[in-house]
Image: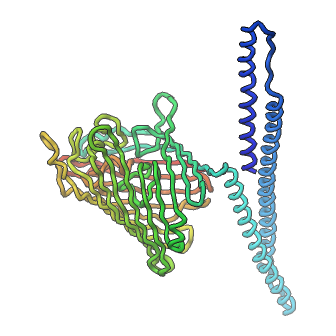
Amino acid sequence: MRMRLRGKAIALIVALHVAGAGPLVAQQRSTSAQKANASVRSTEPAPDAAAELLTAIAELKQMIEAQGRQIERQQEQLREQQRRVESLQAELRRVESGHAAAAAMPAPAPAVAVEVLEGQVEAIAENHSHLAERVSKAEADQAAAQRSTESKLRQLGNFTFSGDIRARYEPFFGGGVVGSPSPASRHRPRFRLRFNANARFSPEWSGGFTVASGEESDPISTNQTLSSFFQRKAVRIDRAFLEYKPNWFKTALRNTGELKVTAGKFGYTWYRTELTLDNDLNPEGLSQTLSFNFKNPVFKNLTVVAFQLPFNEVGSGPDSYMHGAQVQTRWQLGGRARFSSYIGFYDWNHADAIRAAQTAGALTGSSNRNAATASQFASQFGILDVIGRLDLSTWSTRWPLMLQLNYATNTRACANLVNISGTPPACDPSDRDAWWAEVQLGQNREAGDVQFGYTFIRIEREAVLGAFNFSDLRTPSNVLTHRLNLGYQANRNVNLGFATLFGRQLTTAVSPEERFLKRMQIDLIYKF
């Protein structure tokens, strides 16, 4: 029906164009006739074009009405499923009440009465089990029908749509240098809006785009603070990408491998934590992923990801870009444990352009804590990033346990000092290491899910490029932070979240001892 509807829409546009062209041509002819002192007559749209226009409108209206009736029928099916579930649940409660009453009755003295009562109890128990299975099946059918209907309503042609809206209250308390008065507390309301449109054009080609809220000069946050005297808030392009997965590669490897090429502004194609790159940052450029699956009972997958990401192209002088690669492995350790390892390297070339943009105010989001002058970093950045992740199944599928450890080190700490003219900034090449240790219990997927977590973060001054990592830290580097998080899935679309970050700068010769800054985040998230 969608293809026919699209065809009628095209016919309608053509008809409108023809109908609109008639008066213009007639007007030109009328003007020529006036100049020739001929009789002037008004021009009407061509009868054929008008008829075609009316027919297209009528047929398009019928198509829309038919699709509306189809959606109404599907919604009525959902309501009928709900009534069926409620009826079965009521019957189940009645049977359970009878079961409890029968079990509570005193046993009569005669043996025959005892046998009769035992038979009734067994019959009730069997009926209870049968009804419980029917209720479970009806609920599963209802959930499947609801998901199918929602999926159809979200889809238009090849495109599917999704997104989320987040309201956040974010207060700050404490902080400041030990021995000095504490800064005044801060209370910041914020929101985030994201809308995604993705499409699969063929078995090999897909793509999509995302628009999101946030400041134009801040690439590591889609938050928008409720401020600026009620001014309108901007929405900008956050992603725009194409992806190619050739079938010939799968066929050549008998479906045991996959090649994927991604171009544009896209989500991460490799695995990382916010120790090195913020979740809200979407890189730009080109990425290639080569993945192999194995039938080995322990070693399951080997994946190699490469990426080439320009971030400052200029007409004169050298361009700035980051290129790197990551090797990924996945292991099955028995029936309850999965282990994944990730080893990557980020090579930032001509990173001084980032420092110059920060000084000029063209790049915001994080206050710089890497040793630097106004236009140059004291370090170059070649970052080795190593991650180990362990996923464990527990007593319940709703309570998975995740443990991960991320270590990063800058192999070129303070290497740019030789390129700085004048007085160089103080830089210690031993301040090159960073750690991220995280544990999460539970999940946020289905209604009623709960998740708890704790993260320990320690980043020395030159360990990472502070312009692009976790935006919620006290400072992007030279920082120690503890994070506690709690999430509750109220229903399939609504999530309630709470997080607290306790952070301060590391105590060094240039950083005096600080009190912990307490930053809280209370979130209400609606996903569609």
Which residue is nearer to you in this view: 144 or 308?
308
Q: How many marks overall?
A: 0
Q: Residue at x 21, y 54 (%)?
A: 413
Asked whether the viewer can see residue 516, the reply is no
Residue 357: image location, x then y, percent: 31, 38
Q: Residue at x 79, y 25 (%)?
A: 45
Residue 87: image location, x then y, percent: 81, 63
Query: On the rendered structure, is 50 left or right of 232?
Result: right
In the displayed structure, 451 sits above or below 528; it is: below
Query: On the rendered structure, is 267 left or right of 16?
Result: left
Residue 286: image location, x then y, percent: 42, 53
Q: Residue at x 27, y 56 (%)?
A: 382
Quarter-of-image position of residue 385:
bottom left
Residue 222: image location, x then y, percent: 46, 44
Quarter-of-image position of residue 359:
top left
In the displayed structure, 523 sits above or below 388; it is: above
